Image: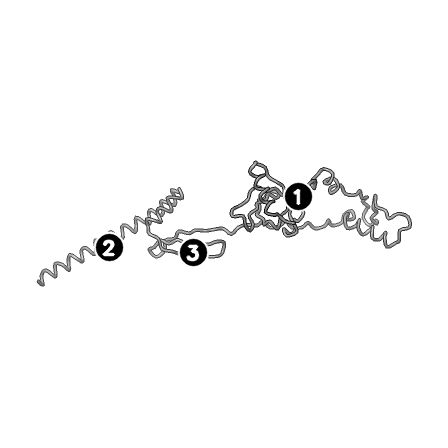
């Protein structure tokens, strides 16, 4: 089972009441299948990984196929006790055979049944001094690709580009100096604004010097033209 449209609507209603409803991870969620998390919010639009669930110390997005609503009474105290309390097992000194406690095949059990019982106990409780079973690696957190917008100054021109993760979604586009200043002012960062303003002042100074040089050339050409008239 997975979350249906009505289940999602129920989660939204519970969240609106300031509560965080529980959900169970399905087999589609991988190694954390059967574990329980709490829904913290529903992203918009409601498609893809839009159900954000708190699992441990992380808040991760999941699809509706990776989650389900727990059955009524699934987390009752009685069911929890059955899942938590393991059968008592006696430990043995190094080299001694393992014996099961509270597990018997009854009178008349065959040797194959006894061997089966012993193998089951050994799989759960290693001999004293043995190597404990390896723990499964925690599932990798699902993260959305980062969106990066870059304002650059190169070869006397300002440009803006954008990328999502490693994918370029917008190649450098030229922008005016006034637009670059407006973008930086919106960041509310005096240090960055000072750098951009300094570059714009240099551009302004260079443009003024070029204009003055052209005016002098024009005056010289007009004077020469007057002599030839």
Q: Residue at x 24, y 51 (%)?
A: 208
Q: Are marks 1 and 2 in contact (CB under 8 Å)?
A: no
Q: Which badge, 3 or 2, comes first in the chain's sequence?
A: 3
Q: Residue at x 91, y 48 (%)?
A: 107
Residue receiving disc 2: 210
Crowd tier of the residue under label 3, counting other residues whose Cα lies within 10 Å: few below 14, some 14–19, many 20 or above:
few
Q: Is residue 96 above or below residue 16?
A: below
Secondary structure beneath label 3: strand
Residue receiving disc 3: 170
> Which picture quadrant has residue 190?
top left
The front one of 16 and 148 is 16
Residue farthest right in this picture: 108
Q: Residue at x 21, y 53 (%)?
A: 212
Secondary structure beneath label 1: loop
Horizontal side, residue 65 vs residue 45: left or right: right
Give the number of the mark in front: 3 or 2.
3
Q: Is residue 209 above or below residue 189?
A: below
The image quadrant where one finds the C terminus is bottom left
Image spot of residue 41 (x, y percent): 55, 42
Residue receiving disc 1: 70
> Which picture quadrant has residue 81?
top right
Q: Residue at x 57, y 39 (%)?
A: 15
Structural distance between the alpha carbons of marks 3 and 2? 33 Å
């Amino acid at each position: 089972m997975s979350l249906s449209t009505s289940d999602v609507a129920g989660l939204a209603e519970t969240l609106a009441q300031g509560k965080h409803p529980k959900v169970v991870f399905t087999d589609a969620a991988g190694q954390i299948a059967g574990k329980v998390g709490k829904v913290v919010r529903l992203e918009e639009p409601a498609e893809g990984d839009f159900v954000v669930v708190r699992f441990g110390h992380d808040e991760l997005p999941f699809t509706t196929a990776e989650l389900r609503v727990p059955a009524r009474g699934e987390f009752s105290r009685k069911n929890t006790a059955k899942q938590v309390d393991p059968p008592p097992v006696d430990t043995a000194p190094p080299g001694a055979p393992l014996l099961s406690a509270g597990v018997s095949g009854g009178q008349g059990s065959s040797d194959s049944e006894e061997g089966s019982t012993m193998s089951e106990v050994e799989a759960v409780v290693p001999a004293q001094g043995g190597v404990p079973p390896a723990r499964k690696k925690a599932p990798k957190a699902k993260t959305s690709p980062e969106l990066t917008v870059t304002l650059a100054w190169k070869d006397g021109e300002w440009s803006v580009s954008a990328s999502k993760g490693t994918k370029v979604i917008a190649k450098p586009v030229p922008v005016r100096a006034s637009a670059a200043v407006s973008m930086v002012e919106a960041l509310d960062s005096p240090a960055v604004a000072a750098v951009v303003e300094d570059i714009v002042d240099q551009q302004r100074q260079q443009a003024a010097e070029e204009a003055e040089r052209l005016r002098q050339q024009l005056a010289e050409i007009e004077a020469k033209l007057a002599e030839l008239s």
